[in-house]
Image: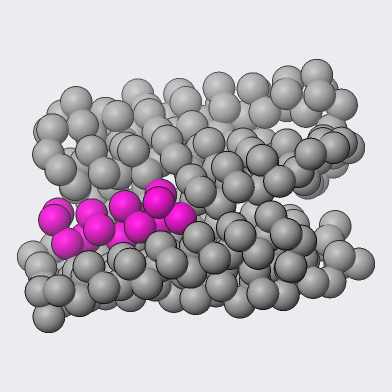
């Protein structure tokens, strides 16, 4: 059992790397299958991590819900790759699932050291920055979708700030992993925003950057269960 986590990490990394390779070659179906397998991998890491270290059950449950909502978001965004006709409908749905997942991450982090009210300032700051970025880059977004994505971006920045506060409050391995993971998630979704909503000619570098930061982020969140 002690080696199972290592095997699952290797399993997840292999499928994540294969997903990146397929997506860079515009093989959407194969990439989607590998993406689902990688998502299954990081959920499994959290479950086995809790089995080996059952000390903080509430933290595990909240992280598991976050990962599962992320998996659902992966499903909708993956379907978009093989059914581009529904792209405009599937992107908001996927974003909402990921947003709910981020809310569960915030509950998990708050369960560790309590809630720090000052960190919430990052949320409206991120919201405003998102709207400014949409306007400056002339992204074709307006109305409810622009609001949802701006809230989402604000949540990403809040996660980074909150996990930075956690590290400041108590510098341990689990908190550091969560901070690094939150920063990687922020980078990943920033790349995704450019990929989806700007007329990028060379998409492969952004695809590779997005996936190469997303999977390490989810793996690190999962590993935090083991060492929390």
| Residue 18, quarter of the rendered image | bottom right
Magenta segment, prevailing SS (helix, strand or loop): helix
Q: What residue appears at the point 66 percent right and 48 percent down from the top-left corner?
A: 207
Work out which quarter of the rendered image holds the N terminus and state it.
Answer: bottom left
Q: What residue appears at the point 67 percent right and 74 percent down from the top-left corner?
A: 30
Horizontal side of residue 81 vs 180, given as left or right: right
Q: Nearer the viewer, residue 161 or 211?
A: 211
**In this view, 189 is above or below 4:** above
Residue 117 visible somewhere in the drawing = no
Horizontal side of residue 161 vs 85, given as left or right: left
Work out which quarter of the rendered image holds the C terminus and state it.
Answer: bottom left
| Residue 167, quarter of the rendered image | top left
Q: Please report the bounds of the magenta region as a residue range.
A: 215-228
| Residue 26, quarter of the rendered image | bottom right
Residue 79 spot, x, y in % from top left: 73, 72
Q: What residue appears at the point 21 percent right and 41 percent down from the top-left corner?
A: 175
Q: What residue appears at the point 64 percent right and 68 percent down from the top-left corner?
A: 31
Residue 21 spot, x, y in % from top left: 61, 60
Residue 141 spot, x, y in % from top left: 84, 39
Number of residue marks:
0
Q: Say whether residue 222 is magenta.
A: yes
Residue 220 visible somewhere in the drawing = yes
**In this view, 26 is above or below 44:** above
């Amino acid at each position: 059992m002690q080696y199972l986590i290592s095997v699952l990490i290797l399993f997840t990394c292999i499928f994540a790397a294969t997903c990146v390779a397929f997506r860079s070659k515009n093989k959407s179906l194969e990439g989607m299958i590998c993406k689902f397998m990688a998502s299954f991998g990081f959920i499994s890491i959290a479950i086995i991590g809790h089995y080996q270290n059952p000390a903080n059950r509430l933290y595990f449950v909240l992280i598991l819900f976050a990962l599962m909502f992320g998996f659902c978001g992966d499903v909708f965004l993956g379907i978009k790759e093989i059914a581009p006709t529904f792209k405009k409908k599937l992107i908001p749905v996927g974003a909402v699932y990921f947003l709910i997942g981020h809310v569960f991450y915030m509950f998990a982090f708050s369960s560790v050291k309590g809630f720090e009210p000052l960190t919430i300032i990052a949320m409206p700051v991120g919201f405003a920055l998102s709207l400014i970025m949409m306007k400056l880059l002339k992204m074709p977004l307006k109305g409810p979708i622009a609001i949802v994505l701006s809230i989402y971006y604000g949540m990403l920045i809040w996660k980074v700030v909150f996990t930075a506060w956690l590290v400041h409050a108590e510098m341990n391995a689990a908190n550091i992993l969560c901070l690094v993971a939150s920063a990687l998630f922020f980078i990943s979704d920033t790349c995704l925003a450019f990929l989806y909503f700007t007329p990028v000619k060379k998409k492969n570098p952004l695809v590779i950057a997005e996936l190469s930061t997303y999977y390490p982020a989810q793996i690190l969140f999962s590993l935090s269960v083991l060492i929390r």
